[in-house]
Image: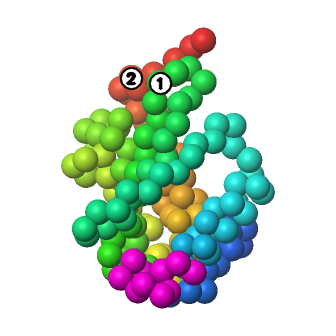
Amino acid sequence: MAEEAARRAVAELPLLRTSAGPRDREGWAPRLKEEYRALIQVRRAKPRRSGSPVRREQQARRQRLVPSGVQRRGHPVVREVLIPVTYPSTAPEIAIPELDGKTAKMYRGGKICLSDHFKPLWARNVPKFGLAHLMALGLGPWLAVEIPDLVAKGIIQHKEK
């Protein structure tokens, strides 16, 4: 059943063709264009209520895409996608610093655990998978399991208007 849902999710997402990472100067720009096109296509197909601009921060060992914005209630939303130098061979990591230490399925710094289910799937589908696949097949299922559990335990609460 979970495999069918994953197959349906993959069928809706555009597959990427360029196999280049941050080290490949000539191939990285076309790969980023494909990534952005895929994210834009997903965004247009399934519009979300709150959008957030993306700013890029270059670091020596990785590139960090940081979507940031403000929700309607006024508290900041910060999620990080950490792209390793060996990308796309190595799956990126997602960090949600606001939830750091609140769940067992999280590493230091708010990085969510994707190693059991998503990383083997990513390894089988290199270079076709990109950031849109990471969000749909990595972050989505993690949030679907962890957030209701955190709410049930009373660790996080829904803020009423």
Q: Earlier in the sequence, mark 1 or mark 2?
A: 1
Is 148 in front, or is 30? 30
Residue at 41% from the left image edge and 86% from the top image edge: 24
Q: x%, y% of residue 152?
A: 44, 28
C-alpha separation, residue under disc 1 versus residue under disc 2: 19 Å
- Give the percent coordinates (x, y) of residue 21: 42, 81
Closest to the observer, 43 or 118: 43
Image spot of residue 110 (x, y percent): 30, 46
Q: Which picture quadrant has residue 51?
A: top right
Picture quadrant where residue 36 is located: bottom right
- Of the 4 image quadrants, the one containing the N terminus is bottom right
Residue 125 percent across, percent down from the top left:
52, 83
Q: Is residue 89 left or right of residue 17?
A: left
Query: Can you name the residue that lies furthest to the left here?
Result: 108
As drawn, is 61 to the left or to the right of 22? left
Query: Residue 124, relative to residue 69: is it above or below?
Result: below
For the magenta stretch, what is the residue range? 20-30
Q: Is residue 14 visible to us here?
A: yes
Amino acid type, residue under disc 2 in the picture: Gly
Q: What residue sits right under mark 2 in the picture?
A: 154
Label 1: element kind: loop
Q: Look at 29% across and 63% down and name the residue there.
A: 59
Q: How is the image coloured?
A: rainbow
Residue depicted at x 57% and y 46%: 53
| Position above or below: 124 against 138 | below
Q: Which mark is residue 75?
A: 1
Label 2 sits on a secondary structure element that is loop
Where the C terminus falls, by quadrant? Answer: top right
Decide whether residue 71 is among the magenta residues: no
Q: Mark 1 is on which residue type?
A: His
Residue 1 shows up from this direction: no
